[in-house]
Amino acid sequence: MPALDELGWDAGWASAFEQLHEDSLIAARVAAQHRGAYVVWTADGELRARAAGRLYYEHEVGEAIPAVGDWVGLRGETVTAILPRRSAFIRKRAGLRSDEQVLAANVDTAFLLAGLDDDFSLRRLERYITTAWDSGAEPVVVLTKADLCDDVADAMLQVESVAIGVPAYPISNVTGVGVDELGRHLLPGHTAVLLGSSGVGKSTLLNRLAGDELMRTAAIAADGTGRHTTTHRELVQLPEGALVIDTPGLRELQFWDGDVTAAFDDVEALAAECRFRDCAHAREPGCAVLAAVDNGTLALDRLRSWRKFQRELESIAARTDHRLRVARKKRWKAIAEHARQRPRL
């Protein structure tokens, strides 16, 4: 079992751990999650643990913590505290519920995988990049299945139009072309996460980076598409010392919180040049954004994505605020009822 510093532990984490002011706690990092049970790594080895009920109770909205990648305080086989996260890749839980779901915590680099096959989508990639910037991690676009693409150069030009300031690498998990280029983002003690749709090649890429069959994979289907095999999030350590979180395929990636500024630098820069400060970029005179669309320097689909993401974030914020108010009201009613039922001293 690696030492804590090989898992990313440093003076900052040590200081945060001391602030817990709880005796008999040991530091651990969450390596995997299985239906409420956790695999954690400590200085003494791997343990199975469960989260204390208090952690579920204190989390007003969304999935109970901890998440894979978290640093936690462990007492026996119970996680009793979670250290403040430096980064978190969060989405709205799939479906109609307005809950958050933490996909990975304390990540330095987010590898955003997109296959260069019939399932390739710039709009989906925009969504991944937006969420990655908001997480606090460095986004890196990884274009898998380059061996199935007739014109990789053209695909790279398309990606560069939406991945502003984000490095992008075309690779092939079949031939290994381009995989070594990712090594510059994999440093000892640093953590990366692999994110992408089902069958895009996340586990296969992780196996190539590790030089071993760490994760179960399946052969591609007859139509060339990958097959989903990963069923849970798991942290693994590569031979060179880097840490990587493998994740199940994302069927959808809805925003939870944040803004789109970093992912849409081009639109934001144009908006700053509009005649009116409160320009809605619809029909206003002197709108630099619409002018860029007219002269072809900004794609109309890019502007539509920006508008859609803004509306989605506003909607999520409104629903979350309402859910918070309901959760807090319910909690205080329960506390008051408990107080009334206590026997008088």
Image (cartoon, rainbow, N blue to C red):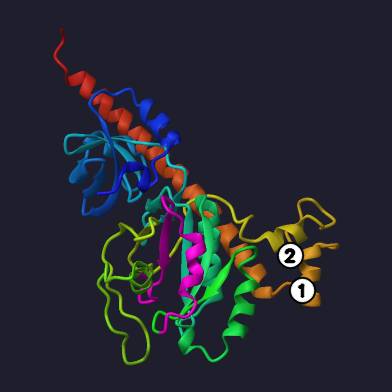
Q: In the image, which disc is placed on residue 297?
A: 1
Residue 164 point in image, percent of width and height: 65, 65
The answer to whether 232 appears left or right of 194 in the picture is: left
Q: Is residue 98 visible?
A: no
Cα separation between marks 2 and 1:
17 Å
Residue 335 point in image, percent of width and height: 27, 26
Residue 288 point in image, percent of width and height: 81, 64
Closest to the observer: 32 or 8?
A: 8
Q: Is residue 180 magenta?
A: yes
Depth-wise, is mark 2 or mark 1 nearer the camera? 1
The secondary element bearing badge 2 is classed as loop
Residue 261 point in image, percent of width and height: 64, 55
Circles 2, 1 touching at the beta carbon (< 8 Å): no
Q: Look at the image and give the residue range highlighted in magenta.
A: 175-202
Q: Is residue 318 magenta?
A: no
The three-letter code of the residue at mark 1 reads Thr
Residue drawn at x 37%, y 43% is 5
Residue drawn at x 30%, y 59% is 233
The three-letter code of the residue at mark 2 reads Ala
